[in-house]
Image (cartoon, helix red, strand yellow):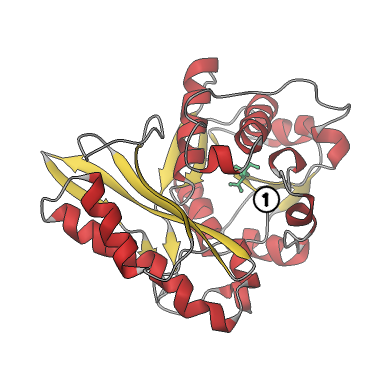
């Protein structure tokens, strides 16, 4: 039985045994469900936080149109056996105008950082508040936001939060499109163009697994597949620092951002090194259309 909680204190007091936290902004899809399932398998108490965090939006229109549906989210949380759905009012998260920001230097310098000024400080600040206020043992994040994951891992290390951060694979539609709550704003006409993003990344992953480790080759493969796309960037970066790198010589990810219609999409494939071989994490594909559209 999933219960809604509204305060940090109440949520903390109800936790029993190891607590697994899934931080979210709601409008759940199968990517969130997979994080909840991973939390369920690892913890006695599963807490999902749902808060559309104004600090991380640098565009007011984007904040206002972020999709919201609490009844739908509660139903999905129940299906996943979540214990507590923490839905704090703004006064609980920010009782006064927040004067403190958590800035994770360098990790936020490239890729999304310069294009969304203040975004990662907003994310790091709210995640630090969730860790401090809820004191979870584990916290689960999707690898789709690879730079966010790097920011969170570094913030945990630098500030000694006693939490283990677990990154989980990206969930994708059967055709390869990475799941995102923002996909509900893609028009049917935009879909073929959106698909070229994951197709390009998969082509690059095939190359990497065949021994082509140079960033220039992998980036060229993505740009070739998506030749008509308006890419904001296509970059190979280190998983730890999110700094651009020239070749896959450490755990890394090939990331891109592009605007398709009115929606800005990001996607990536992660490269892990196993006994000197590169293994591309292309994510997990659904066999049926995502419930985002139902
Ligand atoms: O990934 C998200 O949904 C958000 O950035 C997060 C981590 C919940 C912080 O608001």
Who is closer to the viewer here, 120 or 87? 120
Q: Is residue 192 left or right of residue 115?
A: left
Q: Is residue 31 left or right of residue 123?
A: left
Residue 175 location in percent, x, y? 40, 76
Residue 83 location in percent, x, y? 64, 48
- Total numbered circles: 1
Q: Residues within 10 Å of mark 1 (few under 14, many from 20)?
A: some
Q: Is mark 1 within 8 Å of ligand 1?
A: yes
Residue placed under numbered mark 1 in the picture: 25
Q: Is residue 171 left or right of residue 21?
A: left
Who is closer to the viewer here, 150 or 142? 150
Residue 8 location in percent, x, y? 76, 32
Residue under the point 20% across and 35% down:
249
Residue under the point 18% across and 52% down:
208
Residue under the point 61% across and 24% down:
103
The extreme bottom residue here reads 189
Q: Is residue 216 above or below residue 263?
A: above
Q: Quadrant of residue 146?
A: top left
Residue under the point 17% across and 58% down:
207
Q: Quadrant of the C terminus?
A: bottom right
């Amino acid at each position: 039985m999933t219960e809604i909680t509204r305060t940090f204190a109440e949520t903390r007091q109800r936790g029993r045994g190891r607590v697994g936290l899934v931080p979210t902004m709601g409008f759940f899809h199968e990517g969130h469900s997979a994080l909840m399932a991973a939390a369920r398998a690892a913890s006695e108490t599963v807490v999902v936080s749902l808060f559309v965090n104004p600090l991380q939006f640098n565009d007011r229109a984007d904040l206002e149109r972020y999709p919201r549906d609490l009844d739908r989210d509660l139903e999905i949380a129940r299906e996943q056996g979540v214990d507590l759905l923490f839905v704090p009012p703004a006064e609980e998260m920010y009782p006064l105008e927040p004067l403190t920001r958590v800035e994770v230097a360098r990790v936020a310098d490239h890729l999304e950082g310069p294009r969304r000024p203040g975004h990662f400080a907003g994310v790091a600040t709210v995640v630090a508040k969730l860790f401090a206020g809820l004191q979870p043992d584990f916290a689960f994040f999707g690898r789709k936001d690879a730079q966010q994951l790097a920011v969170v891992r570094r913030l945990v290390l630098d500030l000694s939060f006693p939490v283990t951060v677990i990154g989980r694979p990206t969930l994708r539609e059967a055709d390869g499109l990475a799941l995102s709550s923002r996909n509900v704003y893609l028009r049917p006409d935009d879909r073929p163009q959106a698909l070229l993003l994951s197709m390009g990344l998969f082509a690059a992953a095939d190359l990497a697994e065949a021994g082509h480790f140079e960033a220039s080759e992998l980036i060229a493969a993505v740009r070739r597949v998506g030749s008509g796309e308006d890419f904001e960037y296509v970059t190979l970066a280190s998983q730890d620092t999110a700094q651009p790198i020239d070749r896959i010589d450490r755990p890394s990810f090939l990331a891109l951002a592009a605007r398709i219609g009115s929606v800005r999409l990001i996607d990536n494939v992660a490269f892990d090194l196993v006994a000197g071989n590169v293994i591309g994490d292309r994510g997990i594909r659904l066999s049926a259309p995502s419930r985002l559209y139902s």
